[in-house]
Amino acid sequence: MSKKLTKTKSWNSLEKHYKKISNVHLKSMFEEDKKRGKNLVLKDLGIYFDYSKQRITNKTLNLLLGLAKERGVEAKRDAMFSGKKINVTEDRAVLHTALRAPRGSKIIVDGKNVVPGVHRVLKKMTTFSNQIRTGKWKGYTGKSIKNIVNIGIGGSDLGPVMAFEALKFYCDRSLTFRFVSNVDGSDFAEAVEGLDAAETLFIVASKTFTTLETMTNAETAKKWSLSHLKNDKAVAKHFVALSTNKEKVTAFGIDATNMFGFWDWVGGRYSMTASIGLSLMIAIGSKNYHEMLDGFHQMDEHFRTAPLGKNIPVIMGLLGVWNNNFLKAETQAVFPYDKYLHRFPAYLQQLTMESNGKQVTLDGKNVSYETGPIYWGESGTNGQHSFYQLIHQGTKIIPADFIGFKESLNNLPPHQDYLIANMIAQGEALAFGKTEKEVKAEGTDSELAPHKVFNGNRPSSTFFLDKVSPANLGKLVAMYEHSVFVQGAIWDINPFDQMGVELGKKLAQNIIPELQDKNAAIKHDSSTNALIKFYRS
Ligand code: G6Q
């Protein structure tokens, strides 16, 4: 049992320290240390990580690093990498890092090296995706596959969609990709709109192969496919499964040879580099896919080996704790200044909020401090024309992560200069603001001046990379994965279960028959009863 977080020496020191610096403005921090913008920067793996606009001093950083030491972040990290069952509530190892470990590595779980199995599945994925991409894989009527529909939800959807969108530039444009996740029939209907069943492959992505949404969509897909292809044998040519559950896959009618497996030590939201990435591999090809895996692995290695003070995910995680628990920021915004990353905030929402949205410690005690913040975001510059007002002049502190790239994949001057100028300017405006004096000096009268004041002192980090590429995407995702881990370790919670998603799903199972049978007795509270009656009428 680890010591209560708020009783640790480092936490107490941080509390005292916070009181001292809580009113110090970023402007004076920059004035005091002329090299701050160079000093509070980490550069590794082609990532320029500027955290100088966070509301910290060198002392804060040292205290936070002390906290990481005191909470045993390094030992916990090593336990994860070595395959220890750190997901204690589910008695599982946590080994998404093994999914990108190079051939020849050794990671032992239950006495067995798991790396050869990872590479066997990768090979099978490579062969299959090559067959689809070259047109060698024929559908039931002999036509090549032109459309790929991924059916999955949560971790079996958000990673593939995000990465597909992010790496669209690298995709084979002669293929069409669609993603169905929602149990809302409109999602399925729109996904197959205009597709020829004879040229359509369904990838049923589900770790458990029991998820209501996915199985409902998969059954509908089977009906849709067979209504056009008129023979049960077509399933073998038009359906493949990504799952850990062979029994359920075969019961659905998919041959085990068309199943791409993974393992219980891969959490759903950490599974985009498991076979769940098959649609992406088909889209970008196995070479690009392997480059992405290499990017992930480079960040895994950085996290595993870099000293805490030079470790990007460690610093990110600690800044998150500082902003969440000391500055009392309730949310964390993520703003990628690249349109290709427009689904990245949505992906991060699951990664961060399902992982660290927890109310009890590892040994089941209620936490007495805030855990995971609300993540949200939008790609720049669109957000600037909607909600940035609140970030600049609202009453809440909203730490922001800006993510930008030097090069655009579509060289259309002057777009990239305009885009990046805006990204840099936002961080500058948030940090330094604009005083009333400055406003008045521009000729604004006294009455209007307060409306034009920017208090500044609003924290942000900037991540700069060269361009959107498979490897860089891998680095970015792994970077956030590990920063989530660091925070979970500090907060003494389990980032790898998700019991909070269960209750609503169970209650829905009770309500389904009550909606379907108008005469079924309903014994809920008065609000729930009335909603059911409204639907029935
Ligand atoms: C992620 C969660 C969850 C999961 C979905 C889909 O960590 O476990 O989002 O990915 O519920 O589950 P299946 O892949 O089992 O269908």
Image: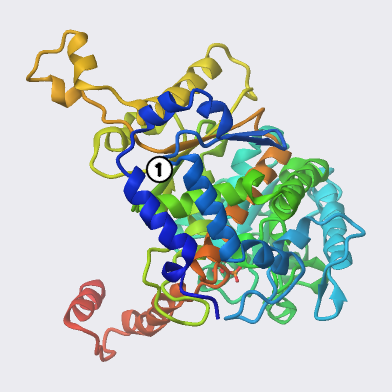
Quarter occupied by the N terminus: bottom right
Residue at screen point 46% across, 55% down:
321
Q: Which residue is mark 1?
A: 399
Which residue occupies 17% across, 8% down? Answer: 443
Q: Nearer the viewer, residue 281 or 434?
A: 434
Amino acid tagged 1:
Pro
In the figure, is residue 98 to the left or right of 372?
A: right
Mark 1 residue element: loop
| Residue occupying image coordinates x 47% and y 68% | 8
Residue 304, how many percent across, how many down? 73, 55
Left or right? Give the position of 337 relative to 303.
Answer: left
Residue nearest the observer in this picture, 88 or 250: 88
Label 1 CB-ligand 1 distance < 8 A: no
Res 396 quadrant in image: top left
Residue 36, horizontal then vertical, whole percent: 51, 29
Residue 495 sits in quarter: bottom right
Query: In terms of image quadrants, where is residue 434?
Result: top left
Q: Quadrant of ligand 1?
A: bottom right
At 80% across and 49% down in the image, what residue appears? Answer: 132
Extreme residue toward the right, this view: 104
Q: Quadrant of the C terminus?
A: bottom left
Tag 1: Cα neighbours inside 10 Å, few (<14), some, or many (≥20)? many
**Along the line of sight, the residue nearer the viewer: 397 or 437:** 437
